[in-house]
Amino acid sequence: MKQPIAIAIDVGGTFIKFAAVATDGKILWEGKCPTEARVSASRILDNIKKSALVVIGELRAMGVTAACVGVGTPGVVDSDLGLVLGGASAMSGWQNIALTQMLSEATGLPTYADNDANLMGLGEYHFGENDQARHLIFLTIGTGIGGAIFLNGVLYRGHAYAAGELGSIMMNYEGEEAYWEEFASTAAMVRSYRKLQVEKADRPIDGKYIMDGYLKGEEL
């Protein structure tokens, strides 16, 4: 292929999603696997490494060599060093993780890391319909809530790389004080559904299960 191809990895609280992506944003191949975020940091790292190697294998079968690896992860990330500093409450032991070093050693490729919501914002800013917008806030709503802030067309990282952690805004809801993501994330929706659920589910309850029920007109 004429375009350089990157290995893209999105580490979520539930799944790791990975893909081969061209510089024009086209996804050539994609897959996912469980993060096992509550097991241990070493298990998460093993799953990330395996994900990258799977993509390399798929590209090799296409006769293509990857140019680099980009990985987005929950938490505060020193994007200059590729170091996960912490702040990802859903990830066991996920602090002081030399993420780019580990992936670079495993793949032999230049590797870059940043907060997952920052990278979502960068992707949407460059490939979405935002040509005229200079000031933007993006939100990711998954197992938690993340955000990315653009000021004058530049990603705002803030003090200690911690800007955009919008899910950590404190609020009071129905007499309970907690982070916004404790009330409004997909994980919060699943917890609420389970509390109100009457009939036994025919498969594990997750965001897709609830959305499928919504589309079928299920009252709850």
Image (spheres, rainbow, N blue to C red):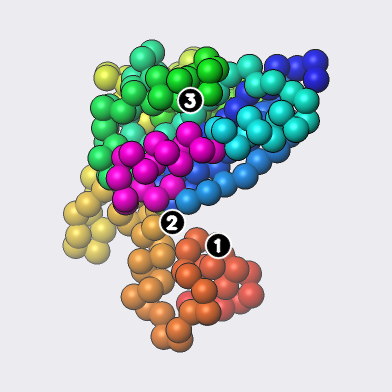
| Residue at the image point whose x is 48% and y is 51% from the top | 34
Secondary structure of the magenta portion, mostly? helix
State the image coordinates of residue 49 (x, y, percent, origin top left): 48, 34
Residues 107 and 119: in front is: 107
Residues 80 and 50: in front is: 50
Can you tell which of label 3 and label 1 is closer to the viewer? 3
Find out whether residue 46 is within the magenta segment: yes
For the residues bearing labels 1 and 2, Cβ distance under 8 angstroms: no
Q: Which residue is mark 1?
A: 208
State the image coordinates of residue 85 (x, y, percent, origin top left): 27, 27
State the image coordinates of residue 206 (x, y, percent, origin top left): 47, 64
Q: Which residue is mark 3?
A: 106
Chain part drawn in magenta: 35-51
The crowd level at tag 3 (other Cα within 10 Å; few <14, some 14-19, many 20+) is few
Q: Which residue is mark 2?
A: 186
Circle 2: element type = helix
Q: Amino acid at mark 2?
A: Thr
Residues 150 and 12: in front is: 12
| Residue at the image point whose x is 78% and y is 25% from the top | 63
Residue 192 vertical placement versus 71 (above, below):
below
For the residues bearing labels 2 and 3, Cβ distance under 8 angstroms: no
The crowd level at tag 1 (other Cα within 10 Å; few <14, some 14-19, many 20+) is few
Q: In the rendering, which numbered label is found on residue 126? A: none
Q: Amino acid at mark 3?
A: Ala
* Residue 208 image-quadrant placement: bottom right
How many angstroms separate mark 3 from mark 1 (CA)? 33 Å
